[in-house]
Amino acid sequence: MHLLTIFVTAASLLPLASATCYKEGPSNTNKQLALDNIDNICKVMQGSFHMGLERTGCVTSASQGNKWFFSVKRIAKDDAVLPLDLCNFGLRREVNGCKTGGDRKENGWEFR
């Protein structure tokens, strides 16, 4: 009985998130271009999501040759609303957290 209690307690402490930084990709990206445009990208992405729904966006700078691709996907089984502030937080964390981009799965959402 004690062993089962310890196992259940330990399992409940496991994180509900996973994050990966991409090992390959452009290293001369303009992060400021991405950060300056996340608000606009998230205004398009926010709203109701059902399981598996993915919304994408792209920001480009032809003069600098930079492109940023963004994606938010509902990975939980229930429907949910993606608020603007959560979208901003999730995408900014990926831009700032990984040199060549990355993805994070957390609380039923995947941000790339």
Image (cartoon, rainbow, N blue to C red):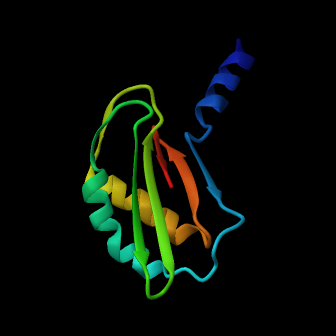
Relative placement, left or right, of 47 versus 71 is: left
Q: Is residue 75 above or below residue 37?
A: above
In the image, what residue occupies the spot 43% across and 57% down?
90
User: Residue at the location (41% across, 30% down)?
Assistant: 51
Q: Report which quarter residue 57 is drawn in.
A: bottom left
- In depth, the one of 8 and 65 nearer the eye is 65
- Name above or below for residue 60 compared with residue 104: below
Taking 29 as reference, is 47 above or below it? Answer: above
| Residue located farthest toward the front when viewing the structure as drawn | 62
> Residue 24 placed where, x, y %?
70, 67
- In the rendered image, residue 68, in percent from the top left (x then y), is placed at 47, 69
Question: 55 left or right of 48?
Answer: right
Q: Given the current orientation, which residue lies at the most extreme top position?
A: 1
Q: How many marks?
A: 0
Q: Residue at x 59, y 60 (%)?
A: 102
Q: Nearer the viewer, residue 37 or 67?
A: 67
In the rendered structure, the answer to whether residue 24 lies left or right of residue 35 reads: right
Q: Residue furthest bottom?
A: 63
Which residue is most to the right? 3
Q: How far from the left and from the top, in percent, is residue 31?
A: 48, 78
Residue 45 picture location, percent across and down: 31, 51
Question: Split into 4 quadrants, where in the image is the N terminus?
Answer: top right
Left or right: residue 42 versus residue 20 is: left
Q: 85 or 95: which is nearer to us?
A: 95
